[in-house]
Amino acid sequence: MDFVNSIDIFIFRIIFICIMTLQYFNKDQLSVVGDALDIAEDMTSNYFKLSLLQWKRNRFDIRTLSSLFGEEIKDNVFALLKKYSSDGKAEIEPLYKRHEFYLIYLQDHYILQALQRDANIKLLPLLAYILTHELVHIVRFCKFQVRFDTQEENNRIEEEKIVNHITYEILQQLSLPNLSYILGAYNPDRMNIDICMNKYDTWRINNAHL
């Protein structure tokens, strides 16, 4: 029993050390997250020609690393997109009143590693790309243009190609320092974004070149 407890303590210490060594966004960087979200929301809503009321129907929120736990933390992706559903009073409410809510889990540590690997990558344009990409997914899910819970790998890859092209179209109109470098790395014709599924309810965004 003591041996088992010792192993548990050892594993806990390893996990604790790994968590403590992760890089978190500082105060200034969190401010950049807010700026990037403003850009992403404005550009995405304009592209899809959504009014303010229509945009607010796309319910979502963002979490950074300090608010993530366990399986929400990954070491090889920029962000995870997760969907939550609330049926409310299911016995009296019809299906169309079901509320869906999306959460974007930003992986601070992996994003900051990309900046450290390449001096041409800047935080604001990278976050603007990541968040715009995720918002395009959310709009398409909310408009029922694609199913969030599709389990077919080919369908998910095809959806990623579509979203990659749309994100490129949206952001190529934006004048932002160093954004062209990001768009070059995410060239939609090269399809170098890997997409995969975690427990059938999560989308991941990653780029091996960054």
Image (cartoon, rainbow, N blue to C red):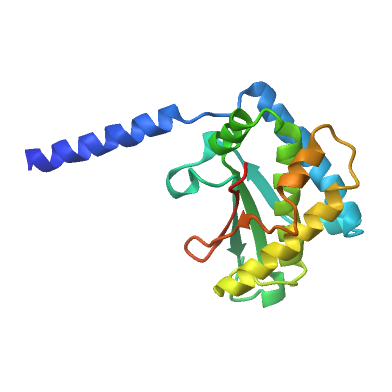
Where in the figure is residue 181, as x and y percent of width and height?
77, 39
Counting from the top left corner in percent of width and height, residue 97 is at 71, 70
Quadrant of image for the N terminus: top left
Q: Residue, x 71% and y 39% (percent of image)?
A: 127
Whether residue 57 is visible here, answered yes or no, is no
Position of residue 84 measured from the top left corner of the image (x, y, whole percent): 59, 60
Tell me the quarter of the image containing the C terminus: top right
Residue 79 appears in view: yes
Q: Residue at x 58, y 48 (%)?
A: 208
Quadrant of res 9: top left
Could you tell me which residue is drawn at 54 percent across and 73 percent down?
Answer: 151
Q: Nearer the viewer, residue 25 or 122?
A: 122
Q: Name the quadrant containing residue 115.
A: top right
Report the side of 162 relative to 78 (left or right). right
The furthest residue to the front = 190
Give the quarter of the image for residue 153. bottom right
Q: Is residue 133 above or below residue 65?
A: below
User: Which residue is depicted at the point 74% across and 72% down?
Assistant: 144
Q: In the figure, 41 relative to 201: above or below?
A: above
Q: From the top left corner, tell me how far across and down residue 191 is, in percent.
A: 68, 59
